[in-house]
Amino acid sequence: MGKYFGTDGFRGEANKNLTFEHAIQIGRFLGWYYGAKEGKKAKVVIGKDTRRSSYMFEYALCTGLMASGADAYIMHVTTTPSVAYITRVDDFDCGIMISASHNPFYDNGIKLLNGNGEKMDEETILKVEDYIDGKIEIPVAEREQIGRTVDYVAGRNRYVGYLISMSKYSFKDVKVGLDVANGAAWQLAKGVFDALGAKTYVMNDSPDGCNINTDCGSTHIEHLQKFVVDNGLDVGFAYDGDADRCLCVDEKGNVITGDHILYIYGLYMKERGKLLNNKVVTTVMSNFGLYKALDKVGIEYEKTKVGDKYVYENMVANGHRIGGEQSGHIIFTKYATTGDGILTSLKMMEVMLAKAKPMSELAAPVVFYPQVLKNVRVKSKPDAQNDPDVQAAVQKVAGELGENGRILVRESGTEPVIRVMVEADTDEICEKYVDSVIDVIKAKGHLAE
């Protein structure tokens, strides 16, 4: 990770840690780097979620891009995976998504994608940061070289058509609930499900700029659970603010996590001879229950650091076809270069319809170990993580758990947070050990003010 950019873009509170000046500078650099530096006019596509500040950052990025001679193609409110898809298929030099994903509305982020629709490489990110810090000087465009903006809602529509084409089955008479989190999917998801014939029930589809992710979406899935049960729905899907993740709710109101999805679709692929290398890619946050279920059906797995960036890198390097995170970032490399919430929900529908089984039955073999995860806001993530007393507390817990559980303490890639997670036989044991480590972090003075 760099000085400004984490594992999923440059994030911070709008106009506090991430300012409109930063956005102008990022636009300035990208417009020059992919354009004038190469002796051409750069083409850059931009999408945004529904946050109030996303409009400000969109215009600031466009200003920077045009000042460096690039043309900015604006997709307006759309999802992160749609920007990745359009960047790739419409031959853009790079793509930009304005979103802080599942974070509250007052935060925002700028995610950069290369011409293949993949997360930008570290080398280019570091050059962007050097420009922000004044280490690089670039010229401005003049006269006819100044760039322009282009309304590109057509790109968003083409992405919707692509999603619809993904389905092998009609959804006729299937009752589907969607929680679109007052976010980027609010105009897209229902249209896709309606076009495929589903009886679609939608909640949290009235964004006002300040309610994205607020008590809704994949981070507050309890509302979709109730919605599915109260309306007698067959299945429900919840997205986050930029719709690059998806969690499900079965017909009984149970939560189907990213780990369940990896098992359900991984097994479906294996049964059809489509699971290349017989492997599913997970992260270190995946539950023991997933691995036990995969072992039982003879599917192998690999573990990466937390972050869909690392999952994708592993998949590309080794030719794997499915991978993801417990949080719902699921990547199907045959169809996408990033997690795609709507695509994931379509794939889960496919398994339900192909096997003629309810979601609860498909997920039943994955029996989770109790898991408690708590986030601690700290002054310095490295200082807290590397404190000898904190490390000793972690080792003590690991020793006491032995083979009956595990502890994982890691830094968030996008927030000033240390995450402490324990899996064990009971919730009480998990709580006790998580709190024991957090108590040491507090006692050593690492908590943020």
Image (cartoon, helix red, strand yellow):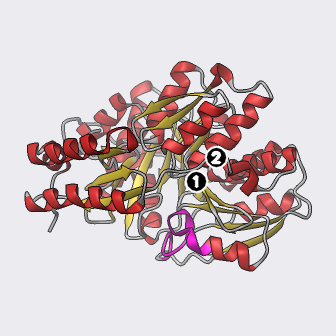
CB under 8 Å between callouts 1 and 2? yes
Report the span colored magenta.
Answer: 211-223
Tell me: 389 left or right of 261: left
Q: Based on the displayed image, in which of its 4 quarters is residue 56 positioned? A: bottom left
Reading the image, the residue beneath label 2 is 261
Residue 237 location, x and y as percent? 67, 61
* Residue ID at (58%, 62%): 184
* Residue ID at (17%, 61%): 439
- Residue 368 drawn above or below residue 254: above
Q: Categorize mark 2 by other alpha carbons within 10 Å: few (<14), some (14-19), many (20+).
A: many
- Residue 204 drawn above or below residue 158: below
- Residue 179 drawn above or below residue 337: below
Label 1 sits on a secondary structure element that is: loop
Residue type highlighted by circle 2: Ile
* Residue ID at (16%, 52%): 380
Q: CA distance from mark 1 to mark 2?
A: 6 Å
The dot on residue 381 is: none
Q: Categorize mark 1 by other alpha carbons within 10 Å: few (<14), some (14-19), many (20+).
A: many
Label 2 sits on a secondary structure element that is: helix
Q: Based on the displayed image, in which of its 4 quarters is residue 174 positioned? A: bottom right
The dot on residue 257 is: 1
